[in-house]
Image (cartoon, grey):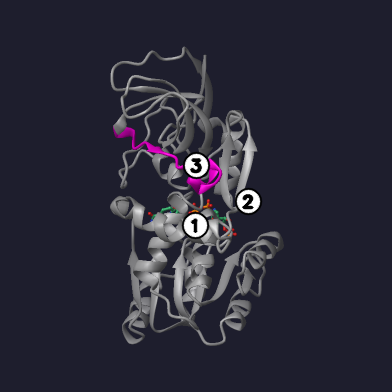
Amino acid sequence: MNKQIVLNERPISYPTLSCFKEVLSPLPEISAGQILAQTIYVSLDPYIRGRMNDAPSYAPPMKLGEVINGGGISKIIESKNPKYKAGDLIFSFCGWQQYSVLESSDIMIALDPRLGPPIGALGILGMPGFTAYLGVTDIGKPKAGETMVVSAAAGAVGNIAGQIGKLKGCRTVGIASGLDKCKKLKELGFDECVDRSLPQFAESLRAACPKGIDFYFENSGGKIFETVFPLLNIKSRVALCGMSSAYNTNQLSDRPDVTSLMLAGMLTRRILIQGFMTLDHSDRFAEFNSVVAPWFLQGKLKSWDSVTLGLENAPQVFIDQMNGKSMGKVIIQVQPL
Ligand SMILES: NC(=O)c1ccc[n+]([C@@H]2O[C@H](COP(=O)([O-])OP(=O)(O)OC[C@H]3O[C@@H](n4cnc5c(N)ncnc54)[C@H](OP(=O)(O)O)[C@@H]3O)[C@@H](O)[C@H]2O)c1
């Protein structure tokens, strides 16, 4: 049988356990061109929350009863596709289930064993690492000696963005909630980490950035962005990667609208704020690998994975992630490797 976790109901704000349901289905048969794969790891990512809404976004919403979407690493157990053979490890959008039937169009990447343990394909050498690389390389373009600030720095993307910024010679300042996250970020090489959960967050951020901010890697939005904005230097850059503070609310903010003030600040300080989507750049994945994999293999970049055993734990782990309790790349191990 195939254990699956499906969308049971849509969240109104933060997801709850009742949004998810565990079901058992018969193991599917495969036809020509398809493969049957056994899931080893499933990646939990913030974009899943967007797909739980019944609203158009850059990807279509999940349907009620549909297996929760998501990428993962699987082992092929049967193949009727000449490109893949039993035993191969692949990355694909397998979803939250023990077994999946996949076709080439499910974006399968055969994993290269020379790149270290396969779990890396979900974090540092996968989508989060690629996202961090694109934001830093294409938008931040930091120069040695500049100050780079990263929000949600203890998340999958943020910790890698800061590590890449450090390799480019930046003074790196992470923003995260809690001592444990800040301690780990310093171990990963961040020069400073500011705890946004403390009342003196704004003062601490200012003190950590005595020369202002040249490059801001934005993962959070909301109050955090408003705290960072006054510190942005003339000709600074903002890589607008994510808005985690907004994903679990369907209400407009009750804070004063500061859009006009911010636009005025952007104008006078010539600030570049640019959004980007990693899915627009799949043709550059090989370039990313050629730059970042050697850094990783040489120990210049470190991976930070938080692995929980058991598919049945995925809903609670995802709820914790949406509540800011996660650290590093959030992964569920479904079966032993
Ligand atoms: N543009 C793209 O193509 C692209 C690709 C991948 C990811 N993203 C986006 O990039 C961001 C980071 O992704 P990720 O994979 O690193 O996520 P992640 O690992 O889930 O990030 C975890 C961190 O997000 C923060 N967070 C979680 N819920 C929050 C909330 N309700 N309010 C404020 N902060 C919250 C927490 O930081 P604190 O320590 O501050 O609490 C937490 O440590 C997300 O917004 C994601 O959607 C964009």
Residue denoted by label 3: 113
43, 316: nearer the viewer? 43
Q: Residue furthest front?
A: 114
Asked if the stretch drawn in magenta spans residue 253, the answer is no
| Residue carrying label 1 | 157
As drawn, 31 above or below 61: above
**Amino acid carrying mark 1 in the image:** Val
The location of residue 66, given as percent across then percent down, is 41, 27
Q: CA distance from mark 3 to mark 1?
A: 23 Å
- Mark 2 within 8 Å of ligand 1, using the beta carbon: yes
Question: Would you say 14 lies left or right of 270 here?
Answer: right
Dot placed on the residue nearer the N-terminal end, 3 or 2: 3
**Amino acid residing under circle 2:** Lys
Which stretch appears magenta? 105-121
Labels 2, 1: front one: 1
Q: Is mark 1 within 8 Å of ligand 1?
A: yes
In the image, residue 309 sits, relative to residue 283, either above or below, namely above
Q: Is residue 152 visible?
A: no
Q: Nearer the viewer, residue 139 or 252?
A: 139
Q: Which mark is residue 285?
A: none
User: In this rendering, does residue 161 appear at all?
Assistant: yes
Which residue is labeled 2 in the image?
Answer: 325
In-front residue for pair 163/322: 163
Residue type for callout 3: Pro
First in sequence: mark 3 vs mark 1: 3
Give the crowd class for mark 1: few <14, some 14-19, many >=20 residues within 10 Å: many
